[in-house]
Amino acid sequence: MTMTASSTRAARWPAVRPWLGVAARLGLAAVWLVAGGSKVGDLAASGRAVNAYQVMPYDVATVIGAALPFVELALGMLLLLGLATRLAAGVSAALLVVFITGIASAWSRGLNIDCGCFGSGGQLAAGQAPSYLPEILRDLGFLALAGFLLIWPRTPVSVDGWLAGEPPVEDEQ
């Protein structure tokens, strides 16, 4: 019996998929840990960055901006450990959709801001050009990682798998 290229790929998927999941989980964890870590030292700047989008009252924006780094750090830790992976991926996906929508809104309204995704953000200096398209494309990539984990949340080397009594690498779910 001869195997076609398609059936060979299909046969490899159960072996490769868990390790792609590890890469997605650790990659998204790194994103959230870096994003939250870069903002947690200056919560006021994080609040100003959220306020720069001009979609909510200043007081609400500053509270959201102050809370956001802690949410990002919590998501990063959950994903790093592989604990509540599907929940963390779902919250990640929701946040990324909000971020993408916010960046697209700022772009469409002609705001001249830095997204604040990995630092202080806020209004750009005169003559500085925003980089909305690369930011949206980057966040779409992160959204794809979250989507992968929503579909296949169990990965090797994770607390989820350990708590479920699964072997380090499980078969297709």
Image: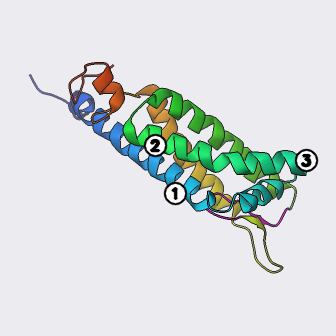
Question: Where residue 143 sits in the image (x, y, percent)?
Answer: 56, 42
Residue at 80% x, 77% y is: 125
Residue under circle 3? 57
Q: Which residues are magenta?
A: 111-120
Residue under circle 1? 34
Find residue 128 and report its image quarter.
bottom right
Q: Amino acid at mark 2?
A: Met
Residue at 72% x, 64% y is: 121
Residue 48 lies left or right of residue 68; in this view the side is right
Quarter of the image that includes the N terminus: top left
Residue 76 falls within the magenta-colored stretch: no
Residue under circle 2? 77
Question: Where residue 119 sits in the image (x, y, percent)?
Answer: 64, 63
Residue 114 falls within the magenta-colored stretch: yes
Q: How far is disc 1 from disc 2 in space, using C-alphas?
A: 11 Å
Q: Amino acid at mark 3?
A: Pro
Q: How far is disc 2 from disc 3 in space, using C-alphas?
A: 30 Å
